[in-house]
Amino acid sequence: MIRRSTLRGWLIAFAAFFAALYLLRGMLLPFVTGLAFAYFLDPLADRMVRLGMKRTPAVVAIIFSAMTVIVSLLVVLIPVIQVQVMSLIENGPGYADRAWQAIHPHVLWVLDHLPEEQVKSVENAAGSYAGNLVNWSGGLARGILSRGFAVVSVLSFCVVTPVVTFYLLRDWDRMMTLIDGWLPREHAPIIRAMAHDIDLTLSGFLRGQATVCLALAVYYGLGLSIAGLEAGLLVGIGTGLFSFIPYVGGIAGFVVGVVLALVQFTDWPSILGVVAVFCGGQFLEGYVLVPRLVGNKVGLHPVWVLFSLFAGAALFGFLGILVALPVAAAIGVLARYALRRYLVSDVYRGETGGDA
């Protein structure tokens, strides 16, 4: 009876915790980002402490160095990206006309070979979709204009995240010791073992995947710029950074890059050069970077990866996409532990004690 009431209490506590996360999802991004930075930088802080520095000065040095690097990159990249964005806006109408001239003969050919009733149906559907697109774009613009707190949110993110990172990184070891002291003594060894497996999985994935994304951002940015693609730096950096979403980041970057190449270039060698950059990036990611830096540390099936990403996006939006894979990896560790326990239990083996 005591165990059953204890289990009921834990279930109620977990349900309340996840309900609070769902209700507060709109304000959690800077805190989750600070937690990720603290988790990512904790081994470096521990190493500096072992070398003789005190924890607080080591944390200050780490955060100051990280912010210096980030600000320096932004100072260098933002003007270049701004120029590319303005160039895209100026040349957008010309690109649209060129694209329409390219597909217009094919559209006419299709319409000529369709019955008159289907042609009218297609025209009505196109008009309806165009109207919906205009309404959606107008609603989006009104939403952006009406939500003047967007700039404030960005500024608060830039302020809150370093503060959260500092305090979590400074008190990380103390918090881990405190949490370990709260564990039920009877099950503490098992919980520590599972936490250790989750830590190995998350640390290997987060640090490895972050390195992969940065390397791909540099590769795609330089490669597409050398290939002569307008906004190549912007597309390349976006493709690299969004590669933390398996399959989706690379495919989206390829589609955007090839479409821009088709409307910008008139010769096939230039277009094939852009395609070659993306093919080289996929080879670099799939056969060099991921096997060496990430490997099989997450242990998730591709279908489960996609499901976790869509589920995270549906529940928590962009924040859900960021935390979907780490949460799915932790759930995978717990599920494998539960499966091992089940395979040696009487429920699986039965009363006759069959082969496990």
Image: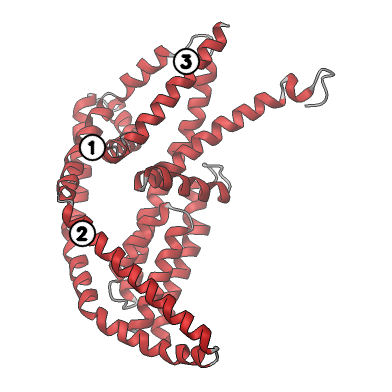
Q: Nearer the viewer, mark 3 or mark 1?
A: 3
Question: Label 1 near label 3: C-beta < 8 Å?
Answer: no
Can you identify the residue that label 1 sits on? Answer: 62
At which x and y percent is residue 21?
36, 33
Q: Classify residue 173 as left or right of residue 349.
A: left
Which disc, if any, is residue 4? none
Quadrant for residue 242, please give it.
Answer: bottom left
Residue 52 appears anywhere in the view: yes
Which amino acid does the dot numbered 3 rest on? Gly
Q: Position of residue 195 (x, y in %)?
A: 48, 26
Task: Tell which residue pokes out farthest to the top in this image.
Answer: 2
How many C-alpha atoms fall within 10 Å of the one at disc 2: few (<14), some, or many (≥20)? few
User: Which residue appears farthest toward the front when viewing the image?
Assistant: 117
Give the residue number, with chain letter if any, for mark 3: 9
- Residue closer to the observer: 318 or 280: 318
Q: Secondary structure at mark 3?
A: helix
> From the image, which quarter does the N terminus lie in?
top right
Residue at image position (40%, 12%) is 181
Q: Residues within 10 Å of mark 3 (few under 14, many from 20)?
A: few
Q: According to the image, label 2 marks what residue?
A: 142
